[in-house]
């Protein structure tokens, strides 16, 4: 199995490959300019990249309860809870899928945030459905705590929680 190395993201040194990975993962994540991605790294409670064979392989960014972040799904958690960390985006490069990068990032997030926050929140699309992502998150111990429509009703998501 490939060795997965995790390192904190740097808003200057890592933004180019982070941007490229983000764009490759649209529409699962929304497209954002480099400057906004760099700002999100700075605002995050957790921002790490994963490397496999010395190549960037994935990224995870999560925000604490008082972050300067305008996501509709983050806002849902802010309205309902005071003590959480919201996993906003996780992306794994196509060449690194099925190597355990996503699971490794989540495990590291759980370890880093334990004792700091009560739980990790995230969302999975329910319309259009994403059964693979839902099964993955359920396997990590996430459970549904709400639902909401996004993008003017074009999509809907299930809001999930995993206690730390």
Image (cartoon, rainbow, N blue to C red):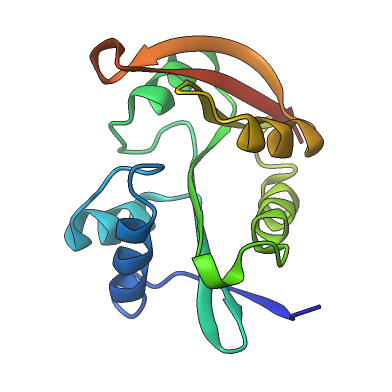
Residue 98 to residue 147: above or below: below
Residue 26 percent location from the top left of the image: 33, 48
Image side of residue 151 versus residue 47, left or right? left
Q: Nearer the viewer, residue 139 or 95?
A: 95
Residue at 21%, 62% in the rendered image: 34
Residue 6 to residue 97: above or below: below
Image side of residue 80 versus residue 30, left or right? right
Residue 102 to residue 68: above or below: below
Residue at 72%, 47% in the rendered image: 110
Q: Residue 96's image quarter? A: bottom right
- The quarter in which the N terminus is drawn is bottom right
Can residue 157 be seen? yes
Q: Nearer the viewer, residue 21 or 42?
A: 21
Residue 156 percent location from the top left of the image: 42, 16
Q: Residue 150's image quarter? A: top left
Q: Nearer the viewer, residue 82 or 13?
A: 13
């Amino acid at each position: 199995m490939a060795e997965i190395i995790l390192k904190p993201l740097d808003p200057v040194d890592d933004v180019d490959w982070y941007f490229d990975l983000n764009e490759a993962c649209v529409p699962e994540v929304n497209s954002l300019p480099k400057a906004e991605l760099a700002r999100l790294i700075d605002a995050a409670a957790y921002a790490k990249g994963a490397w496999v064979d010395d190549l960037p392989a994935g990224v995870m960014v999560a925000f604490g309860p008082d972050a300067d972040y305008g996501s509709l799904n983050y806002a849902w958690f802010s309205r309902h809870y005071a003590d959480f960390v919201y996993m906003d985006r996780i992306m794994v490069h196509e060449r690194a899928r099925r190597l355990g990068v996503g699971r490794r990032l989540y495990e590291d997030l759980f370890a880093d945030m334990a004792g700091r926050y009560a739980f990790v929140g995230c969302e999975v699309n329910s319309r259009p459905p994403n059964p693979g992502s839902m099964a993955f998150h359920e396997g990590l111990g996430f459970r549904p705590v709400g639902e909401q429509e996004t993008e003017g009703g074009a999509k809907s998501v299930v809001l999930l929680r995993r206690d730390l």
